[in-house]
Image (cartoon, rainbow, N blue to C red):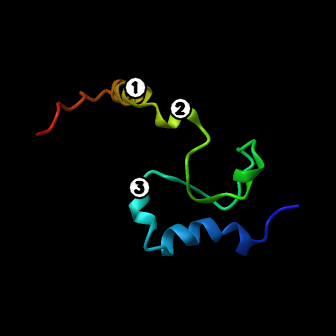
């Protein structure tokens, strides 16, 4: 059984219309989640911590950025001040 269109749109509408959402840049928003194993989090919430532990790994993010620059043939920009 799938959610109705109205139910499926709730998370997107919340993020678009909430005055509070911009305070949580990069947060994971979910109305409900099959990605969480514990019952408390399955109901979702706004905002949530992403269920992917790699999403908060800054070292991995830096490596991905460097790799991406190399793949597209761009020189990585230097630090800005």
Q: Position of residue 3 (x, y in %)?
A: 79, 66
- The residue carrying pointer 2 sits among few (fewer than 14), some (14 to 19) or many (20 or more) residues within 10 Å by Cα, namely few
Residue at the image position 17 percent from the left and 30 percent from the top? 78
Label 3's element?
A: loop
Rendered image: mark on residue 38: none
Query: Foreground residue, 40 or 52?
Result: 40
Crowding at label 3, few (<14), some or many (≥20) Cα neighbours within 10 Å? few
Asked if residue 72 is positioned above or below residue 36 in the image, the reply reads: above
Q: CA distance from mark 1 to mark 2?
A: 10 Å
Kindly give the residue lying farthest to the left in the view shown.
Answer: 81
**Which secondary structure, mark 2?**
helix
Residue 7's x, y, as percent? 73, 71
Q: Which residue is mark 3?
A: 25
Q: Residue at x 65, y 69 (%)?
A: 9
Above or below 28: residue 77:
above
Query: Can you give x and y, in whole percent of width and height, for residue 20 in the image?
Result: 44, 69
Alpha carbon distance from label 2 to label 3? 17 Å
Q: Are marks 2 and 3 in contact (CB under 8 Å)?
A: no
Determine whether, in the image, residue 49 is placed left or right of residue 74: right
What's the CA distance linking mark 1 and mark 3?
A: 19 Å
Q: Considering only vertical position in the picture, is 37 above or below 66?
A: below
Q: Is residue 7 above or below residue 35?
A: below
Marking on residue 59: 1
Image quarter where the C terminus lies is: top left
User: Could you tell me if the residues under marks 1 and 2 are in contact, i.e. CB atoms within 8 Å?
Assistant: no
Name the residue at 69% across, 51% down: 41
Write down the residue under mark 2. Answer: 54
Q: Is residue 7 left or right of residue 73?
A: right
């Amino acid at each position: 059984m799938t959610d109705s269109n109205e139910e499926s749109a709730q998370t997107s509408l919340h993020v678009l219309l909430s005055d509070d959402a911009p305070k949580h840049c990069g947060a994971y928003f979910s109305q409900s989640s099959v990605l969480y194993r514990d019952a408390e989090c399955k109901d979702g919430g706004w905002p949530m911590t992403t269920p992917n532990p790699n999403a908060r790994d800054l070292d991995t993010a830096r490596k991905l950025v460097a790799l991406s620059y190399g793949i597209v043939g761009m020189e990585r920009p230097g630090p800005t001040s």
